[in-house]
Image (cartoon, grey):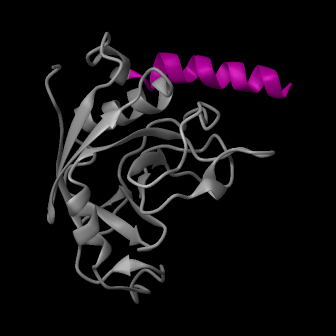
Amino acid sequence: MRFCYLLLLLFCNAVFASAGQFIQPDNLYPKVKLITSHGDIVVELDRSRAPISVNNFLSYVKNKRYDNTLFHRLEPEFVLQGGGYDANYQAVEELKPIFNESGNGLKNQLYTIAMARLTDPHSATSQFYFNLQDNPHLDPGRTWGYAVFGYISEGSEVIEKIRTVQTDTSAELGWPNVPLEKVLLKMAIILPEQ
């Protein structure tokens, strides 16, 4: 039964949530520039190992759903998370959840980008995070891990600048580790093939 569920989930992802599959379809390593309030970051995505996650991410970029969003979680010795909320903490319009590709061989290492999710291993939608250190406990083992789908190819110094932003529990939201100074993702742009 679980196997049938996974096959159905894969099929639905392929049919309904993969507009990203048509973006540079022959490019196994597309690049996206993230223009933030603290500088520019370029991520190189790995479609060869994480095609579902990459195509999902590209779909959000193409549809401009990451533009003017927040990095709403910062744990300086852990992760920087974004992609879920606009500057007013309103939720981003989400696509269908995707299949978890955490067993693809990519590890949660410093400066990699990975899909955030809920307890359900196949619940990732729009939110992603950057690893701010090596986080092997996020890799799969006896249970599902968190799917890495690329790495920062330019702009690691921007991540280091963001890492210094002070955080606290948000009084209005009740969330911990929220940057006191808003860290904005102003725009995400798919870069031309090289």
Q: Residue at x 28, y 26 (%)?
A: 30
Please identify the quarter of the rendering in which residue 158 is found.
bottom left
Q: Which residues are magenta?
A: 1-18
Q: Is residue 63 visible?
A: no
Q: Quadrant of the N terminus?
A: top right
Q: Position of residue 94 (x, y in %)?
A: 42, 43
Name the foreground residue: 20 vs 76: 76
Q: Is residue 165 above or below residue 26?
A: below
Q: Residue at x 80, y 23 (%)?
A: 3
Q: Is residue 137 above or below residue 169?
A: above
Please identify the quarter of the rendering in which residue 170 is found.
bottom left
Q: Residue at x 44, y 79 (%)?
A: 177
Q: Quadrant of the C terminus?
A: top left
Q: Is residue 11 visible?
A: yes
Is 151 inside the magenta-drawn segment?
Answer: no
Q: Residue at x 47, y 46 (%)?
A: 114
Q: Position of residue 175 (x, y in %)?
A: 47, 79
Q: Position of residue 160 (x, y in %)?
A: 27, 67
Q: Residue furthest top?
A: 26
